[in-house]
Image (tube, rainbow, N blue to C red):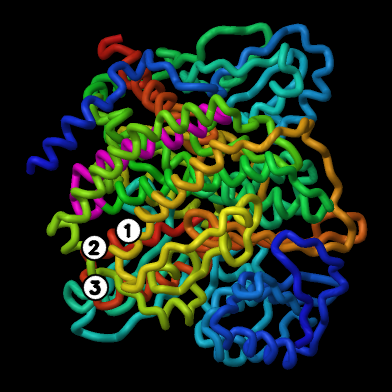
Amino acid sequence: MFDHLKIIIHQGKQYIPDVTTAVVPGIFRGRPVISSEISDWKALAEICPTGAITSAPVSIDLGRCLFCGECAFLFPDRIRFTTDYKLACNVREDLIILSGEDKPVELRPEFIRKEISGLYGRSLKLRQVSAGGDNSCELELNACGNVNFDMGRFGIEFVASPRHADGIVITGPVTENMAGPLQICYDAVPEPRLIILAGTDAISGGIFDGAPALNRSFLSKYQIDLYVPGNPVHPLTFINGVLELIKKRKKND
Amino acid sequence: MNAISLNNNERIVFSSIPVLSYDQFMEQNLVLLENDSCHCISYFGFHFDGKIRLVCCIADDTQNSILVSSAVTLKDECLPSFTAHQQAFHAFEREISENMGIGYTDHPWLKPVRYPANRADRKLVIGNYPFYSIDSDELHEVGVGPVHAGVIEPGHFRFICNGEQILHLEIQLGYQHRGIESLFLEKKNLLQKVILAESIAGDTVAGHTTAFVNLWESLCNYKAGKDLQSDRTIALEIERIAVHTGDLAALSNDIAYQPGSAVFGRLRTPLINHFQLWCGNRLAKGLIRPAGTHFPYTGQLADQFLRMLESWEPDFNEMWNVFHKLPGVMGRLEKTGILSNEQVRQIGAVGITARSCNLGRDIRSSHPHDYYSQINHQSVMKRHGDVYSRAQIRREEIRQSLGYLRQLVNDLPVREPYKLLQLQPEPGSFAISLVESWRGEICHCAVTDKNGELMIYKVKDPSFHNWMALALAVRNNEISDFPVCNKSFNLSYCGHDL
């Protein structure tokens, strides 16, 4: 017992006091800022491995971006990845960052389902389904619950059964072989139920977009409540996105 | 002996691989495997000149060489199997059968591997797989997955139990199949290929990406400088320590030992954050690139790393010293999930799984690449083959890798200027790249056509061998010990399913 007390004293406080204002250490490729002066957009579009960059006006789609940063290496004075990790939103188009823009990515309250804040504002239980995910987003979602990020303090947790869940979090590009189990898992969640897409692979298919081994038909059937980009998603991106989702629209709004 | 001998990361002309009759091919490779120092690192088939070419690669650990031979066959052919004589080939032959439509006369269990999109028989569907069952009033079955209780990847486990005791476990995978090997051929841009390599298994980004870039550079006759080799070795060793630490947290969690789960879990954070300091990504995506790098490892990073270790190591040691002395912990880990040396030899296990049963499979010493040839690595070995042996190996490998890292970051080589060369592979070539990732041996191998384009790209994660080890280890254990057994191997679903 004394050994354990010693460990507790030596470990001290490990949690991040405020996850909404925490600063990520070192370099981090978060929300990009694109200069409006780009002329050679063709070279830019060609280098992007997933076709996330388009012209007229030049933009980067964070739903397709793998955050490899190659575009910023090609045009270091025109494209800059900031350390802003708040990338989640609830309207797919809002993930497209236009050139000349430098404003935060946010959820639009009018599109958040009315019942969410009342039902889940203080307790949200989620069932995670990996559907072809490479285990990077899964590791980061697990990290959300560790003693550093401690997502549990907000009542947000991953649960073992879809029966106990209020929604599902999908990672991976959704493979043909997981399409059936994903549907079964979703159907087992009681209504009302949320769908959160975590990671670029889930949002657009990422590098696997169009591959014959995928079957993304599930995603076109339902409203998506939250898009969380990243490769993988950073725990702070996920936690802040979910917090906005459950807090931003007030109960009687 | 009619096989060509090559080294890890050595390019050869594809046509120099001897083509034998199937009987000769089979006999030769079976004889090779009788030698304890030899094991099969890759065996695959692909369409070549309107026929099917089978290529078998056997690594000889004492000679530091790889022996490659081949044979020609046709679709719908029915062949005698290697597996009937050497079980280590079982997964390779199942894969060949599933992909190429070849039958085997005497394969003991031609069970589908992963139901790939390009499988020979499209009528087979993963949801209809007939699991092995026993008709009995006393026994019951437990089905788990593909969606598991935790935040982990999908796979189906079907247990046959006698009360609490597991008699048999069958594992069916394939849910994660994304078609990585085909995409390597379809994606023409080199950056896309590197990103594919980074996506094979997100917990082994440094391992698989190093295997890819080393293979690509070999095919292009390019030799990475000392600085790049040092970077890659540092990345591999940080990845090893980070995942091993996380595994100790997960083992603690599975036996409901909260202090271990919390402390080992939080000790993983500064390690992966070091990757973020280095390359802007906690799992090292974007770090490793062929023939160059955007992120040279600097003296400043070395200082930050060494400073972090000053508090990290005492914290880790303090936790481990309590962990491994607690009867409540030891009671769950010792003599749980035992594998014998004979079993791991038979199934061709690699990595931690093999080393926990005193079978010295370790690419860092047998086929060294990058900086390992200068390290003179001695593998950490255990004899008992239980969950505790696999935990101990993690602890000791962490200590060993910290030593290597101190050596590497204190002696960073002079950097050469790079601007990420776009190299083109030599036409008609063949090469193999082996990497010892934290989990075990990764093997990538490729053949190029007459234009230097990839004709076949094969990826083998250590999990491909080791899933069978889990199925064997849980026999006669209580089903409640399954999670801790599973975690002690920590195998990859996506690395297996590709």
Residue B306 placement (x, y as % from top left): 45, 32
Decide: few, some or many residues near mark 3? Use Cα within 10 Å; few <14, some 14-19, many ≥20. many
User: Quick check: marks 1 and 2 in contact, CB under 8 Å?
Assistant: yes
The amino acid type, in three-letter code, at marker 3 is Asn
Mark 3 and mark 1: Cα distance apart in space: 18 Å
Q: Residue at x 82, y 80 (%)?
A: B18
Q: Is residue A216 visible?
A: no
Residues tagged by mark 3 and mark 1 found on one chain of the structure: yes
B249 left or right of A94?
A: left
Q: Residue at x 72, y 66 (%)?
A: B7
Question: Which SS class for mark 3?
Answer: loop
Task: Please give the label number shown on residue B406.
Answer: none
Circle 2 chain: B
Q: Which residue is mark 3?
A: B477
Circle 3 chain: B
In primary-sequence order, the first of circles 1 and 2 is 2
Residue A173 placement (x, y as % from top left): 55, 43
Task: Assign the N terminus of chain A to one quadrant of the image.
Answer: top left
Q: Nearer the viewer, mark 3 or mark 2?
A: 2
Read off the magenta span: B252-280
Q: How many marks?
A: 3
Question: Which SS class for mark 1?
Answer: helix
* Closer to the camera in the image, A135 or A62: A135
- Residue occupying the far left of the picture: A1
- Magenta segment, prevailing SS (helix, strand or loop): helix
Task: Please give the label number shown on residue B391.
Answer: 1
- Residue occupying the far right of the picture: B450
Q: Which residue is mark 2?
A: B333
B273 left or right of B473?
A: right
Q: Residue at x 68, y 91 (%)?
A: B27
